[in-house]
Image (tube, rainbow, N blue to C red):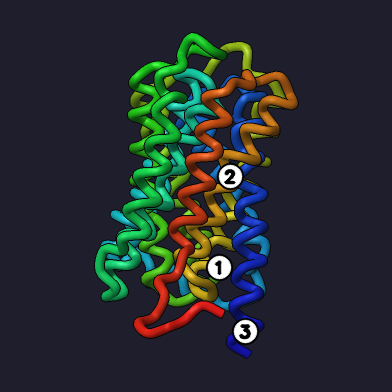
Amino acid sequence: MTSKRTSAGLLAGLLTVTLWASLPVLRDLITLPPMLTAAVAMGAAALMALLMGWRGASSGVAAWRDGKFWLMGVGGLTGALYFYFSALSQGDPAKITLVTYLWPLGFMLVADILAGRGVQMRTLLGAAVAFSGLVPLVLSNGQGEPTSTLGYAQGIASGISWIMFSLYLRGRAALSWGEYKYLFAGTAAASWGLHRLFETVPEHATAMDWGIAALIGIGPYGLAFITWGYALLRSSSTLLGVLTYFVPVMSSVLLILMGRAAFSLPLVIAFVGVLGSAVITQLKRRPPGAVSS
């Protein structure tokens, strides 16, 4: 039974990674500002959760009384959306996505500490390899679309928000549809408030802009969050962290194939660094006295 639960969690993680990989491509097709996009997407996600769970009793009301719901759930998700969408407007989406998805390293470090395993040397070594691979990419603004320092900073801030949101999901029992409904609705409201404060609606927005923003909420930022929460409760956090490394690889390949990002040697080096980091973090220390066969 445990093996089946782990396999189901792994499959949910693979689905999540696939959905997240499509996000930069979808975001690049629309002209809506970041927080308006987030508000529309999370509104659509809340509607999806409402329709999917309308038959069952909703326990989501209790979530409103939990401070972590607002700080780590709504706050983490809103921050992840805001900083990532903002970063995508600051330069090459392939570079931004790759930098943002350093967050699994932080997630694995924190998860190890919370599980009582302490700081694992292989995780630190994996982080060093990943960062080393990213240095040529960050310094390669002469190739492809120029990417500002602010864009990289916002990508890192989005990653930190992702860590906070993932820790919130991992620290709870499985969320009901009702709880996801409230989580998505809270994020939509927060995003709408930020939009009203700092953004304006573009005059040339089209029906396709609104439609793709809603599609983001149903897929990459709706169903994917639900499958991610499911995977976090049923599979290894380290293994899931490794799976997320494939998001920037898959999304960058899609962007390059669509002509939205430039292929370059620094991008290849970054891929190797990030994937090498994934391999290193999965290496298991040989028990004392063990002999090789």
Tell me the number on the disc at residue 3. Answer: 3
Pick out the residue farthest to the top.
142
Q: Position of residue 239 (x, y in %)?
A: 51, 64
User: Residue 223, how many percent across, how many down?
Assistant: 63, 56
Q: Which residue carries the number 1 mark?
A: 231
Disc 1: CA contacts within 10 A as few (<14), some (14-19) or many (>=20): many
Whole-angstrom CA distance, mark 2 to mark 3, is: 25 Å
Q: CA distance from mark 2 to mark 1?
A: 16 Å
Q: Quadrant of residue 159?
A: top left
Q: Residue at x 55, y 68 (%)?
A: 231
Circles 3 and 1, Cβ within 8 Å, touching? The answer is no
Above or below, comparing residue 196 to residue 118 in the picture: above
Q: Mark 2: give few (<14), some (14-19) or many (20+) Cα within 10 Å.
A: many
Q: Secondary structure at mark 2?
A: helix
Give the residue number, with chain letter if any, for mark 2.
247
Label 1 secondary element:
helix
Q: In this rendering, does residue 55 appear at all?
A: yes
Question: First in sequence: mark 3 or mark 1?
Answer: 3
Give the residue displayed 39% in from the left and 80% down from the top: 287
Q: Earlier in the sequence, mark 2 or mark 1?
A: 1
User: Foreground: 101 or 71?
Assistant: 101
